[in-house]
């Protein structure tokens, strides 16, 4: 079956611009996570959705970052006034339930964002 | 707070040799532990996970890991490396906070396999 998909695969933008990154989770998965992976580092948690609501957004670095999941499926990560330090790979993951701590997360291929 | 330390950012082995990737964790509660593999331009794929029960966990592609509470370790091993094992490997622990699986990752270990 289809896995987690993310679009675009690569995004190049200029400092100060607005970008949107899209995640399509596995069908039927209610839990959705966003992570950010900077060069040479492991992924870092950004935000977790259970259904339509953001249950934990404690990893968002500042108020330039925002994410939505209006219908409980597709999610969009939005970054305003991009900065060079936002350059990273943004990973999306989904899992079936979310309310189970040992549950497997399935990751998408990521969106590689480069801010010039 | 939970944390993960992966010793060795780069490991190089010969084809057919033992693979050993080290992971130590810090957790205030009994941990759930995971190993993920990342191939170039691909997402992370779960190799194996430890939740409860048997401390020796077998995963895909011949990998296994052993949870050692006394050493706070969860090292990943494979008896015989294959060229296709070349990738980046991440160890992760599930955060104690919340009833969901918020993962805390180590910095990763890049495995090179040479003929």
Image (cartoon, coloured by chain):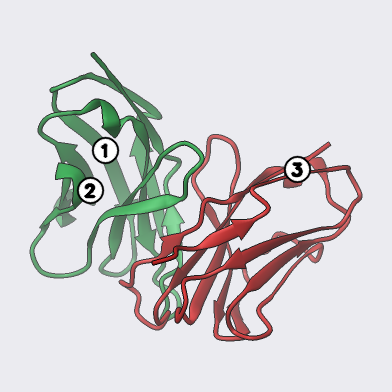
Mark 1 nearby-residue class (10 Å; few <14, some 14–19, many ≥20): some
Q: Is residue B1 visible?
A: no
| Figure check: B59 above or below A63 | above
Q: Quadrant of the N terminus of chain A?
A: bottom left
Which chain can be seen in red? Answer: A
Residue behind mark 3: A85
Residue behind mark 2: B73
Q: Confirm or deny contact between disc 2 and disc 1 (CB under 8 A).
A: yes
Q: Quadrant of the C terminus of chain A?
A: top right
Which chain can be seen in green? Answer: B
Left or right, residue B64 beside residue A95: left
- In this rendering, which labeled residue sits more in front, label 2 or label 1? 1
Residue behind mark 1: B22
Q: Mark 3 vs mark 1: same chain? A: no
Front residue of B4 and A23: A23
**Picture quadrant where residue A65 is located:** bottom right
Q: Position of residue B22 (x, y in %)?
A: 26, 38
Residue at point 13%, 23% (across, down): B16
Left or right, residue A66 beside residue B90: right
- In this rendering, which labeled residue sits more in front, label 2 or label 3? 3
Q: Position of residue B65 (x, y in %)?
A: 17, 48
**Picture quadrant where residue B19 is located:** top left
């Amino acid at each position: 079956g289809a896995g987690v998909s993310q679009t675009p695969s690569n995004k190049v933008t200029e400092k100060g611009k607005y970008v949107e990154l899209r995640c399509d989770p596995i069908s039927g998965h209610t839990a959705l996570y966003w992570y950010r992976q900077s060069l040479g580092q492991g992924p870092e948690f950004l935000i977790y959705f259970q259904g339509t609501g953001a249950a934990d957004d404690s990893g968002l670095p500042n108020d330039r970052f925002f994410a939505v999941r209006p219908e409980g499926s597709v999610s969009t990560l939005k970054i305003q006034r991009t900065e060079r330090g936002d350059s990273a790979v943004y990973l999306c993951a989904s899992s079936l339930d979310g309310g189970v701590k040992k549950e497997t997360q399935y990751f998408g291929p990521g969106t590689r964002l480069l801010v010039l | 707070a939970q944390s993960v330390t992966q010793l060795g950012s780069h490991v190089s082995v010969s084809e057919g040799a033992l693979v050993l990737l080290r992971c130590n964790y810090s957790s205030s509660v009994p941990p759930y532990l995971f190993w993920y593999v990342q191939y170039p331009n691909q997402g992370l794929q779960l190799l194996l996970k430890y939740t409860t029960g048997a401390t020796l966990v077998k995963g895909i592609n011949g990998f296994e890991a052993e949870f050692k509470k006394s050493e706070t370790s969860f090292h990943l091993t494979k008896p015989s490396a294959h060229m296709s094992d070349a990738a980046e490997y991440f160890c992760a622990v599930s955060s104690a906070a919340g009833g969901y699986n918020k993962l805390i990752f180590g910095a990763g270990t890049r495995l090179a396999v040479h003929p």
